Image (cartoon, rainbow, N blue to C red):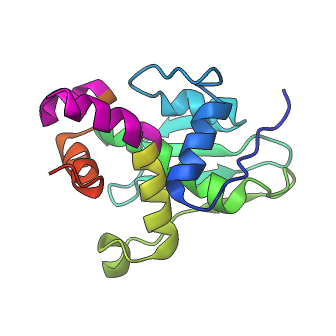
Amino acid sequence: MSKITVDDLSTPAAAATETLLKTVAPDGYLNLPVDPARVAELLGLQPQKLMLDFDVDGLLVRDKKGEPLKVVFNAHASPQRQRFIVAHEIGHWVHEYQNESDDSVFGVVEDRDDTSSRRIYGEEVWANRFAAALLMPAAIVRRHWGEGRTRDELAEMFGVSRRSMDVRIATLGLQ
């Protein structure tokens, strides 16, 4: 399989759209909910659920040269949270690591301090916005919102938490 790269990094939404088109929606048709684990696999990443410390959501790891980069996510998290974590880690890969050599060995855990919890750390904000756009593409959310779907219906349709859907609706100016 040839390596897929995401070229449009101008915004998290543009990168997420390109990622979807190059992986799970090459014909422009997208099944909901988006399966971020499948997106990861198609990008050459290996999703892996592990029991992590409660204060660690996920990380990118390559423990041996030449192996695929692993998108590790916390088994303690809810299924909706796990999906967001995988999408978030894909965002980090797209924005920071997609051109990393397959010979590099590393593990990246983002800091979880006061700054990151307020979402003002640049890479964390970028990855969160990417994850939201990947799991809840704006045009599709707008269309279903315009059809009168409730927040709960949308959250279920997109496989996200109600809180994530509330934030997405607000971010898209649909309130």
Q: Position of residue 52 (x, y in %)?
A: 42, 49
Residue 152 painted magenta: yes
25 vs 48, nearest the viewer: 25
Which quarter of the image is occupied by the N terminus? top right
Q: Residue at x 53, y 20 (%)?
A: 29
- Decide if residue 76 is in sight here: no
Q: Is residue 46 above or below residue 29?
A: below
Q: Residue at x 68, y 33 (%)?
A: 22
Q: Position of residue 20 (x, y in %)?
A: 58, 34
Which span of residues is magenta-colored? 134-157
4 vs 139, nearest the viewer: 139
67 vs 120, nearest the viewer: 120
For residue 160, what is the image quadrant? Answer: top left
Residue 79 painted magenta: no
Left or right: 164 in relation to 72: left
For residue 112, what is the image quadrant? Answer: bottom left
Q: Residue at x 67, y 54 (%)?
A: 8
Left or right: 1 in relation to 54: right
- Magenta part, dominant SS: helix
Q: Residue at x 55, y 42 (%)?
A: 17
- Decide if residue 154 is in sight here: yes
Q: Position of residue 94 (x, y in %)?
A: 65, 53
Question: How many tags in the picture?
Answer: 0
Q: Position of residue 88 (x, y in %)?
A: 48, 51
